[in-house]
Image (tube, rainbow, N blue to C red):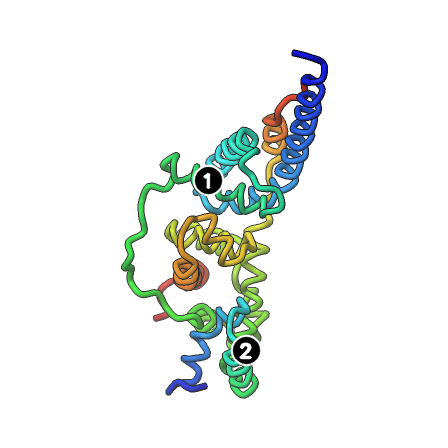
Amino acid sequence: MSETTREPDARRLATEARDRVRFEEDALALSDQVYRVARHLVGSRDDAEDLMQETYARAFRSWRSFQPGTNLRAWLLRILTNLNIDRGRRQQRTPDLQPLEEGDYFLYNKLEASGDGTTDEQRVVERLSQNDVVAALSEVPHDFRDVLVLVDIGDFTYADAAQILDIPIGTVMSRLHRGRRILKQAMAETAVGGEQE
Amino acid sequence: MTAADPCAHCEEMMQPYLDRVLTDAERAEAETHLDECTYCRKRYRFEDQLRTFVRQAVQSEPMPLELKQKLADLRTPLQ
């Protein structure tokens, strides 16, 4: 190979190496945010940690398929949710028809009725504990929880969540709607118990 | 509100309203009802605060430092 051929090759390799390092740094800078979502997509902390490592290993291998200028956090979460499904961590599918969940005002009404008579919204919220929320979230069926975690915790738009989960945007909206109600119902049961019907 | 039970309709609009995905007309309709109805206004404020509370509750567990290091170790070694 002549000197003139080697020089452009060397430049190309140097550019690629620089792009790869930048990609890896950008991806690592998002790891806290990705973990926050991963932690609540899967059942346990150990699973979340394994999934994070598998996700980053795959992302670093496939970095060329990321299109610069698009949403890297969504791209990483897409890998993570696919791996989560591939690894069989969430084999059970949510039946399409579940018992109808309560309405949107259910949790407030329940907390208000079971409390000390206060109707002040802030004080009603304060009757919930962090554990109530975490425990209730883990009870939400996977398909609903995926959307709930991406939108309400991960701060993704409906469109991003649709792309990450590879489902239509209308499905994101309907699962989110039901997921939030199921979550509130679970929180009500955790915080108040089911005796106040 | 156009439904027979305006509070039930407001309840249906609550999450899309908080998500800011209602049309201008729907939002105006929801806000008019919330201005007039103490029952729904209380529940709107609760829902708004609940979202913040849920987000904070589940974000309090940080990523373990060891995991952060493991991820960093997955980087491609520099030649």
SS class, disc 1: loop
Relative image position of residue A84 (x, y in whole percent): 42, 39
- The residue at which mark 1 appears reads as A44
Rendered location of residue A15, percent (x, y): 69, 29
Relative to B39, A139 lies left or right:
left
Residue A174 coordinates in the image, percent (x, y) = 39, 62
Q: What residue type is labelled 1?
A: Ser
Label 2 vs label 1, nearer the camera: 2
How far separated are the C-alphas under marks 2 and 1?
A: 42 Å
Q: Where is residue A56 in the image (x, y as percent from the top left)?
A: 55, 33
- Residue A113 visible, this orientation: no
Question: Could you tell whether B73 is left or right of A84 in the image?
Answer: right
Instruction: Identify the residue at image location x=57%, y=67%.
Output: B49
Residue placed under numbered mark 2 in the picture:
B24
Mark 2 belongs to chain: B
Nearer the observer, A6 or A89: A6
Q: Nearer the viewer, residue A193 or A137?
A: A137
